[in-house]
Image (spheres, rainbow, N blue to C red):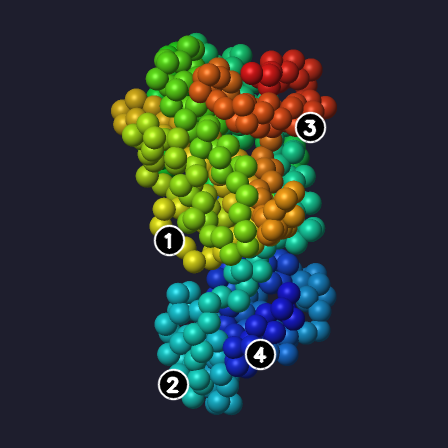
Amino acid sequence: KRAEIAAALQKAGADATLITAPPSIAWLFNIRGADVTRTPLPLGRALVAKDGRATLFLAPEKVGNELPAFLGDEVDIRAEADVEAALERLGREKKRVAVDPALAPMKYVKTLIEAGASVVDLADPCALPRAMKNDIELAGTRAAHIRDGARVTEFLCWIATKAQDGSVDEIAAAKKLEAFRAATGKLVDLSFDTISGAGENGAVVHYKVSTTTARRLNPGELFLIDSGAQYQDGTTDITRTVPIGKPSQEMRERFTLVLKGHIALATARFPAGTTGHQLDALARRPLWEAGLDYDHGTGHGVGSFLGVHEGPQRIAKVANTQALKPGMILSNEPGYYKTGAYGIRIENLIVVTEPQAVDGGERPMMAFETITLAPINLDLVVGAMLSDAERHWLNKYHARVRQTLTPLVPTDVAAWLAEATRLI
């Protein structure tokens, strides 16, 4: 990784770069920390030279005995308080230092300039390679999603069989899901505070449940739960919407429109150079045709035992020049929100695949691999609204969910899962 960053510095004509983003520091040195809730980040700074040598600045009390040996001889560990002195030295040596103007604290830029350094504007050189997961990271995240999917499936079974009478509230539901995940023995933390929204609270896109806002899961309403976990081998993020009692026809129709958009993005093929911005409309088209929409992005990048929100890739209405690259993980999460009534969102994580030849085609195309595994509620699907291709995708996805997760869940959950993933 340091050699890759060094090559980027040489190309930019810089002698060194200052890395200030905690996710980049964690990725670059293969370390994690506990300075930030829900995200395993170490707070610190780093300098990387064009020869690949580096200095990592951390608070001394956070440096364990094993870290120096792990990092090796080409990485020096210094106190975080020594950053400015190191920058002043680069200035005295008249070095060209690359900094990301969007991330670097201005006091560091000022120190460099006043000490005599030349500052080169360069986007964080770790950001793009961090987003393009390697084979080990992808294998880890697939394992994490299988583990997580089994626990989410247990939770969905519990909701369907034990929480349909209005006796459970949003807080209890969120705690129950966390307990299922904790039972794996491998849960490090949640990847964000769970969005647990029943009825009208589900229509609040980034709803945060509290003792003053918590509603019961009442019959006749929808329950939206957006949650994720941090495991050492991967970060998860999944949203499922389920009915409590019997859903209305409007709920089912609008859920199906969201599902059609989700499938359209999941099955997209696209050439090299395509941005997420160019694909965003695929997920919205079924809603647009019905005069509906949602006011959030369709997809965000996801880290590898790092942030559940990660750039530079995204899928959104807002223009973004970053082309999608193989190995990038993104969310696929179209939704619909009826203010004061209910919210719908279906979210899986997807990985950009390597370009593949298309039969009879002239250009190789990339696609998405869906890595999240948990049933999509079929009681909310209007089968007549699905095309044959959409029905095939849903049945194939559910067959994969059933085959993968059945051996990992209790017998009663397996029986429920068989029905939850039935052919439609």
Image coords of residue 1 (percent x, y) = 64, 65
Type of amino acid at the residue the image marks with label 1: Ala
Q: Secondary structure at mark 1?
A: loop
Type of amino acid at the residue the image marks with label 2: Glu
Give the residue displayed 48% in from the left and 17% down from the top.
Answer: 383
Type of amino acid at the residue the image marks with label 4: Gln
> Measured along the vertical axis of the image, is residue 267 above or below residue 15?
above
Precedes in sequence: disc 1 or disc 4: 4
In this rendering, would 359 be left or right of 172? right
Disc 3 marks which residue? 404
Image coords of residue 90 (percent x, y) = 50, 84
Disc 1 marks which residue? 319
In this rendering, would 350 be left or right of 67? left
Disc 2 marks which residue? 114
Image coords of residue 65 (percent x, y) = 68, 62
Disc 4 marks which residue? 10
Camera-nearest label, 1 or 2: 1
